[in-house]
Image (cartoon, grey):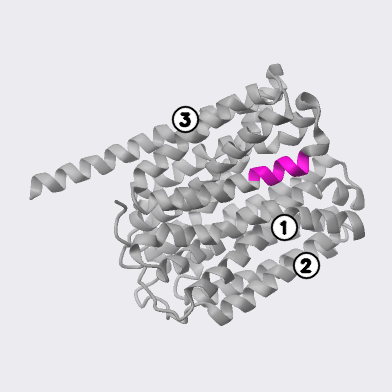
Amino acid sequence: MSSNPVPDVQQVKVHAPGAVLAALALGGFAIGTTEFASMSLLPDFAAGLGVDAPTAGHAISAYALGVVVGAPVIAVLAARLPRRIILVALMAVFAVGNLLSALAPTFGWMMAFRFFSGLPHGAYFGVAALVAASVAPPERRAQSVAMVMIGLTVATIVGVPMANVVGQWIGWRWGFVIVAILAAMTATAVYVFAPRAPADAGASPLRELGALAKGRVWLTLGIGAIGFGGMFCVYTYLASTMREVTHASAALPVVLAVFGAGMTVGTLACAWAADRAQMPAIGGVLLWSAAALALYPMATGTLWTLIPVVFLIGCGGGLGAVLQTRLMDVAGDAQTLAAALNHSAFNFANALGPWLGGLAIAAGMGWTSTGYVGAALALGGFTIWVVAALDVRRERLALAAAE
């Protein structure tokens, strides 16, 4: 069974926990829409701002860098604020950043505005996960956290195609306007429905930094930073693989939606498993991902074999909610920073996976080699999990001996 919640994640009674989770999930939907739609709108804003596609890709990297930088900095600086106020402020900043992106006059400004837009991303998910856990019974914490992540997975099915269609019909700038509107709606909903709990009286930036001194926090982050890289490795080059190998590029929207459906199913299933056996659930999803990614190169020949394998790879996205819950158990009273760093780790994976996959392709190993690279990364994450699991086992044996 998973551990009981640490003292800092105190249960809060609310009249409508479903409304709280829906408000938090709306923020995940907004963030997921801008994160993935930016990739699909890349050719359009590249042409609109007078740069080539590879150069425009730096705007995607700027957003990811904003996530990596913003998550720990905001978590530490906002330690003494009530979580409801933090979430409202983060969504307000996110709305402004995306509105500015829509108005960017040059590519240089676009880079700056995408970096600014990325700053609230990790901190939002981290704090939202803590709020979600606080309104759920202890035995349903992971499933409650998963509902926040569902907003992001549903964005890959609904939000990204919606923003892409709007961008194609009336201009790429409107894709970012849609996200700004969603963020403003989230800020309003969170302000109305999130629990009005005061900040922890003992909270401080120094206490949050204490998370960095915990080996189990680093092991958990390492699992995500390496193990999640495999999924991003395949996802980044999926469109090119379908064009060059499967010869079915017209079906890309359908395949991307299937991937999003897999993420949604995986998030719900993994959270259910984590509420019953947390560490086995983490190890299991890593092995699942390794197997699905290893099948990918053999499945790219036809659309009918590719679609089910892409669904299985998407299911591996359930790792996110499980690791978020694990961090709550190992971070002690440094909850906010540890939770936010989870998304810094995932964005590290988002950079590592595509980079290694690109090296394999450039070395002449072919587009399908991303599956093997991804499987190796998933197994790398599993190796770190083994170390973490042995550490847990040693602690249990020590406690049993002490009794």
| Residue type for callout 1 | Gly
Q: Which residue is mark 1?
A: 159
Magenta span of residues:
252-259
| Residue type for callout 2 | Leu
**Mark found first going from the N terminus, 1 or 2:** 2
* Residue 328 percent across, percent down from the top left: 38, 58
Q: Residue furthest front?
A: 304
Q: Specify whether residue 288 is painted magenta.
A: no
Quadrant location of residue 176? Answer: bottom right
Element on which disc 1 rests: helix
* Residue 58 percent across, percent down from the top left: 75, 45
Task: Judge the density around disc 2: few (<14), some (14-19), many (≥20) Cα neighbours within 10 Å.
Answer: many
Q: Which residue is mark 2?
A: 99
Checking the image for residue 332, the label placed there is: none
Which callout, 3 or 1, points to the residue nearer the camera?
Answer: 1
Q: Which residue is painted at 39% across and 61% down in the image?
A: 140
